[in-house]
Structure formats: structure tokens, C-alpha cells
Amino acid sequence: MKIALIGYGKMGKMIEQIAIDRGHEIVSIIDIDNQQDFDSPEFASADVAIEFTAPQAAYGNYLKAWSKGVKVVSGSTGWMKEHGDEVRQACSEEGNTLFWASNFSIGVAIFSAVNRYLAKIMNQFPQYDVEMEETHHVHKLDHPSGTAITLAEEIVENIDRKEAWKEDTTDKKYLRVDHIRRGEVPGIHTIRYDSDADLITITHDAHSRKGFALGAVLAAEYTKEHQGLLTISDMFKF
């Protein structure tokens, strides 16, 4: 498969190595200083572009890739509120393809399935209050993380006593989501159900970014053969 990379930071370099190890060809690498390469024949030859950039750049990158007929796999977060409707229309009505996930880790996909199942169970036990905490490296600017938002939305969807999620709240009708930024932590997500009697905790603790990078390449392999707006739940049937 021919892959283009959009964004060439630590994640982009790790994706490059894993893609090559899996027998794929990197035909184009686009970063801040060579945006003109979106118009190159090398980029247009890609089956899929894997995009990890900043929230303010992501949507524009999708449009540039789609204009060249290139499908996109993206782990960029923070763009959905402003451009979600446009992306859905572009994929459902205009024939474009985007595989988007807040986290491509296989472990997080499993953790998310456990989170949904546990929330359904805990909906029956109002004596337990639920809260979430996410920890990431100091270079991560957005908060809460996209993964935390996805997990929080899954909890709110399944627990009737929570109306929505919020940061820094003491109002019990909201799911409280806290964030911590320290060191070079790849990502820790912890969900706690606390009662007077006991505490139930589930945690996903990433050892490195390698799991995210492998998941992104697996998503690219899946995306090559599929169309539309795709997610982790399409690739993994938990």
C-alpha cells in the first residue's frame, strides 16, 4: 500500500517505521515547511494519508487530501465541534473517506468496550458516583484528551444520572473529568466508581506511543478497502 504522512513529529516518524516494517511504501511526507507537496504527483499516488497534526490544521488537511482523491486516517482532535457537520457531509454525500479516532491503540479500543459495558451495569447502582482522570505529557495542549472525551461520552450515554461531562465541577449531575500534564507520559485514563462501601477502578496506561502508531497503520490498511466516515468500532467489532 502507498501511504502519505501528514505531520512528521514523533508520531509521524513512528508510523513511518511501522508502516515500512509491515511492507508499505511511504510516497510522501508533508510537514509545516513543505505544504506545496499536497499538489505533488507523489501525494496524489497515495492510497491513504495518515494525518497527525494540530486541531486547527486538521480539517484543512482533510480537504487538501480529498481534493487529490486520497483517503485519510486521522488522530487529530479538537476540530469536530467546528467542522464535524461538514466532515460528515463530505463523507456521506461527496464520496470522501475519513477514518477518525481519538485514539488508535488496540488496548484503548478494548478499554473502551469495557467502559461501555461497565457503565451499563453501573446505571443500575445509583449509590456509585463516577469520575474520570486523564494524564498526558506536558507537550499536549488540549484538555481533556480526545480519548477522555470519547470515554466520557460513552459513560454519559449509558448512565441516566449523568447529563453531560464537565471539567472542574462538583455538580453530581455531571461526569467530572480531570486532567494532569506531567513529564513525558504517553497517556493514562482512569475511571472510578466510588461508593460508601467500596471503589471500582479501571485504567488504561500506555507504555509508549507505539500502540497508537500500530493502530493507525492498521486503520490505514482497513481504510484502503472501505469508504465513508469510519471509526474504531468499524474495524474492531467488540
Image: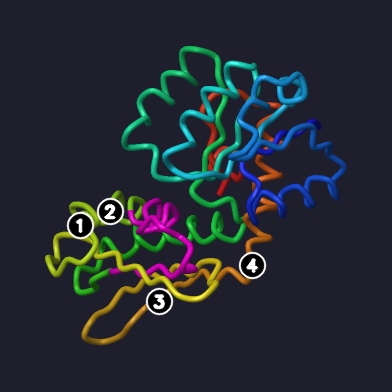
Q: Marks 4 and 3, Cα distance to the nearest angstrom?
A: 22 Å
**Disc 4 + disc 2, Cβ < 8 Å:** no
Q: Where is residue 32 in the image (x, y as percent from the top left)?
A: 58, 40
Tell me the amino acid under the disc marked 2: Val
Quadrant containing the N terminus is: top right
Q: Looking at the image, is mark 2 or mark 1 earlier in the sequence?
A: 2
**Disc 2 + disc 1, Cβ < 8 Å:** yes
Note whether 210 is above or below 91 in the view shown.
below
Residue that numbered label 2 is attached to: 156
Note whether 223 is above or below 156 in the view shown.
above
Residue that numbered label 3 is attached to: 201
Q: Looking at the image, is mark 4 or mark 1 earlier in the sequence?
A: 1
Q: Looking at the image, is mark 3 or mark 2 earlier in the sequence?
A: 2
**Disc 3 + disc 2, Cβ < 8 Å:** no
Q: Marks 4 and 2, Cα distance to the nearest angstrom?
A: 29 Å
Q: Single out the residue that lies furthest toward the front.
A: 33
131 or 75: which is nearer to us? 75
Q: Is residue 163 magenta?
A: no
Q: Looking at the image, is mark 1 or mark 3 earlier in the sequence?
A: 1
The local secondary structure at tag 4 comes to loop
Q: Marks 1 and 3, Cα distance to the nearest angstrom?
A: 18 Å
Residue that numbered label 1 is attached to: 162
User: Which stretch appears magenta?
Assistant: 131-152
| Residue density around tag 3, few if under 14, some if 14–19, many if 20 or more, within 10 Å | few
Q: Looking at the image, is mark 4 or mark 3 earlier in the sequence?
A: 3
Q: Position of residue 203 (x, y in %)?
A: 47, 72
Given this view, does label 4 or label 1 mark the residue nearer the observer? 4
Q: Which residue is drawn at 30% across and 49% down?
A: 157
Q: How many labels does the image show?
A: 4
Q: Position of residue 124 (x, y in %)?
A: 25, 63
**Disc 4 + disc 3, Cβ < 8 Å:** no
